[in-house]
Amino acid sequence: MLDKIDRKLLSLLQQDCTLSLQALADAVNLTTTPCWKRLRRLEEDGILVGKVALLDPEKLGLGLTAFVLIKTQHHSSDWYCRFVTVVSEMPEVLGFWRMAGEYDYLMRVQVADMKRYDDFYKRLVNSVPGLSDVTSSFAMEQIKYTTALPIE
């Protein structure tokens, strides 16, 4: 069970994972040893699963975000495993979900431009047979983006 201090530590790390152990401890009114023990427990419990740097896709020339909705008539475990393997190996796919509702799968894809999206699309549909509908929508403006979970 997470207490108030655990939640505060997680919140701080979600905003800036480069904070020193001392800065984290000071922020939650602990000394470094109990703070470190809490962080280690959060890692061991699988709550704190990684620390990453967030990059600006625009500045890296990856300014086109596509949301791809997929329908399929295939739902066997063999087909599913192949589909998941193919999509998981595509570096352009930043998020991939199996859905309930009208569509079976949703992907968030980040590429440089429409030409690169078309290359991605062709690779996708040629790699996995049985996709009955691949519908793409393109982001015009990013209004909100966060990786921080609402834990407080």
Image: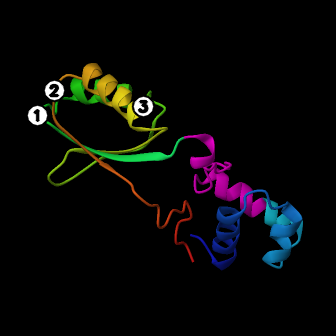
Residue sitting at x 52%, y 72%: 150
Mark 2 to mark 1: distance in Å?
7 Å
Q: Is residue 112 above or below residue 54?
A: above
Q: Is residue 37 left or right of residue 124?
A: right
Q: Quadrant of the N terminus?
A: bottom right
Dot 2 lies on which element? loop
Instruction: Out of 54 and 18, give the one closest to the viewer.
Output: 54
Residue sitting at x 89%, y 66%: 22
Magenta residue span: 37-61
Tell me the kind of residue under disc 3: Arg
Report if the CB atoms under discs 2 and 1 are less than 8 Å apart: yes
Q: Earlier in the sequence, mark 3 or mark 2?
A: 3
Q: Residues within 10 Å of mark 2 (few under 14, many from 20)?
A: some
Colouring:
rainbow
Q: Examine the structure image and report whether residue 44 is included in the region drawn in magenta.
A: yes
Q: Residues within 10 Å of mark 3 (few under 14, many from 20)?
A: some
Q: Is residue 127 above or below residue 131?
A: above
Q: Which residue is mark 1?
A: 73
Residue sitting at x 68%, y 74%: 8
Q: Residue furthest left?
A: 73
Q: Which residue is mark 3?
A: 116
Mark 3 to mark 2: distance in Å?
23 Å
Q: Position of residue 20 (x, y in %)?
A: 85, 60
Q: Examine the structure image and report whether residue 53 is included in the region drawn in magenta.
A: yes
Dot 1 lies on which element? loop
Q: Quadrant of the C terminus?
A: bottom right
Q: Position of residue 93 (x, y in %)?
A: 43, 38
Q: Is residue 2 left or right of residue 53?
A: left
